[in-house]
Image: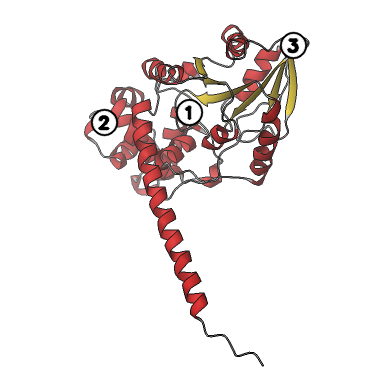
């Protein structure tokens, strides 16, 4: 399957804006999708904000598997200089816990003389604008269900001594963890033109039939999901939902769209696509493969340079 990549031009500008802004920031909030915390964490952001106190917010917790959410919270809270909380960005009371968490991470900030300066970041469509609107108690930012709605940095005063800086949603140039690419696509973090729905649906169903077969069976009224291949599950979904073409064959594209939509809408139940342990394995494998690609690329470049040097030069007159 092809690797999913998506890095629109405005994201380069976001990268530059974060690099400039981070110099005067006290705490960095990274909003993660609770259904795929590892895949929705931006490795570029970790590099840009290195050394700053970090608050990981697992958003959309109401859509995620609570047992796996607990594993991710423990994973992040065990790391120095980091705290993690889970919430649903549309609920006001838990959202306000962010302010208290920021004060814990930067106890010397938060006065008229030294106001708290917080940068909030996250991938597209992770619910950042909804959270900011909830925190501010008004429609502070434009919201939408399409990736990349926020385009310019905004400063929101949540209190006289607390400033929140918002940035556009940003992915990273190369996704080296293949599974992360598919999980991000399934969640709606990348634009539709960047991936093939059928490939994404098959990867999604591979996870669901392994960890949540009963939810798939209950939703689509099919049996024996755990013993089926990914293709058989997708075909069964297509037939169950009447996604058929002439001759009663399954419309694979329509079946794929149904599977992805039902996951995003959480109508199958509360699902998390990865655990900390699973993601660590994927990341290690991705890093190894990426290093091998780089070695091969370096070898090709070295060979090109050697060949170039060996090309006879015309004698100077």
Of the two numbered discs 1 and 3 on the same chain, state the one appearing first in sequence.
Answer: 3
Residue 161: image tag:
3
Name the residue nearer the viewer: 56 or 238.
Answer: 56
- Answer yes or no: do the residues labelled 3 and 2 have beta carbons within 8 Å? no
Q: Is residue 275 visible?
A: no
Q: Element under label 1?
A: helix
Residue at 43% of width from left, 39% of height from top? 182
Q: Nearer the viewer, mark 3 or mark 2?
A: 3
Q: Is residue 117 above or below residue 206?
A: above
- Tell me where residue 25 sits by quadrant: top right
Residue at figure coordinates x 46%, y 46% from the top left = 196
The residues tagged by marks 1 and 2 sit, at their Cα atoms, a distance apart of 20 Å
Q: CB under 8 Å between callouts 1 and 3?
A: no
Report crowding for label 3: few under 14, some 14 to 19, many 20 or more residues within 10 A (C-alpha): some
Counting other residues with Cα less than 10 Å from the Cα at mark 2, is it few (<14), some (14-19), or many (20 or more)?
many
* Along the line of sight, the residue nearer the viewer: 117 or 258: 117
Q: Rounded to the nearest whole Å, what is the CA distance between mark 1 and mark 3?
A: 37 Å
Extreme residue toward the top, this view: 93
**Horizontal and vertical percent for residue 192?**
54, 42
Query: What x and y, as percent, mark residue 295?
Result: 41, 56
**Dot 2 corresponds to which residue?**
225
Left or right of 313? Residue 108 is right
Query: Which disc is residue 109 wearing?
Result: none
* Foreground tag (1 vs 3): 3
Element type at marker 3?
Answer: loop
Residue on which disc 1 sits: 264
Q: Give the percent coordinates (x, y) of residue 260.
A: 45, 34
Badge 1 crowding class, 10 Å Cα cut-off, few under 14, some 14 to 19, many 20 or more, is: some
Cα distance between the residues tagged 3 and 2: 54 Å
Estimate the x, y position of residue 232 in percent, counting from the top left.
28, 40
């Amino acid at each position: 399957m092809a690797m999913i990549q998506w890095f629109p031009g405005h994201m380069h500008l976001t990268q530059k804006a974060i690099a400039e802004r981070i110099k005067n920031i006290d705490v960095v909030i990274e909003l993660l999708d609770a259904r795929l915390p590892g895949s929705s964490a931006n490795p570029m952001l970790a590099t840009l904000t290195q050394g700053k106190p970090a608050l990981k917010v697992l958003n959309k917790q109401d859509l995620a598997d609570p047992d796996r959410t607990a594993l991710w919270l423990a994973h992040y809270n065990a790391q120095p200089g980091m705290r993690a909380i889970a919430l649903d960005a549309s609920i006001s009371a838990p959202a306000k816990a962010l302010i208290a968490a920021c004060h814990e991470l930067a106890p010397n900030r938060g006065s008229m003389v030294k106001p708290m300066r917080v940068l909030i970041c996250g991938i597209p469509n992770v619910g950042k604008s909804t959270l900011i609107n909830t925190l501010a108690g008004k429609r502070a930012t434009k919201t939408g269900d399409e990736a990349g709605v926020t385009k310019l940095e905004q400063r929101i005063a949540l209190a006289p001594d607390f400033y929140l800086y918002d940035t556009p949603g940003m992915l990273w140039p190369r996704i080296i963890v293949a599974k992360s690419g598919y999980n991000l696509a399934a969640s709606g973090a990348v634009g539709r033109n960047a991936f093939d729905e059928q490939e994404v649906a098959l990867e999604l169903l591979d996870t669901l039939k392994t960890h949540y077969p009963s939810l798939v069976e209950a939703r689509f009224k099919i049996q024996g999901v755990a013993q089926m291949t990914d293709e058989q599950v997708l075909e069964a979904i297509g037939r169950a939902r009447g996604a058929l073409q002439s001759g009663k064959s399954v419309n694979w594209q329509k079946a794929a769209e149904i599977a992805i939509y039902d996951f995003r809408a959480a109508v199958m139940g509360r699902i998390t696509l990865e655990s900390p342990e699973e993601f660590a394995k994927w990341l290690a494998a991705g890093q190894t493969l990426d290093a091998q690609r780089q070695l091969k690329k370096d070898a090709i470049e070295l060979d090109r340079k050697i060949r170039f040097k060996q090309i006879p030069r015309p004698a100077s007159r």
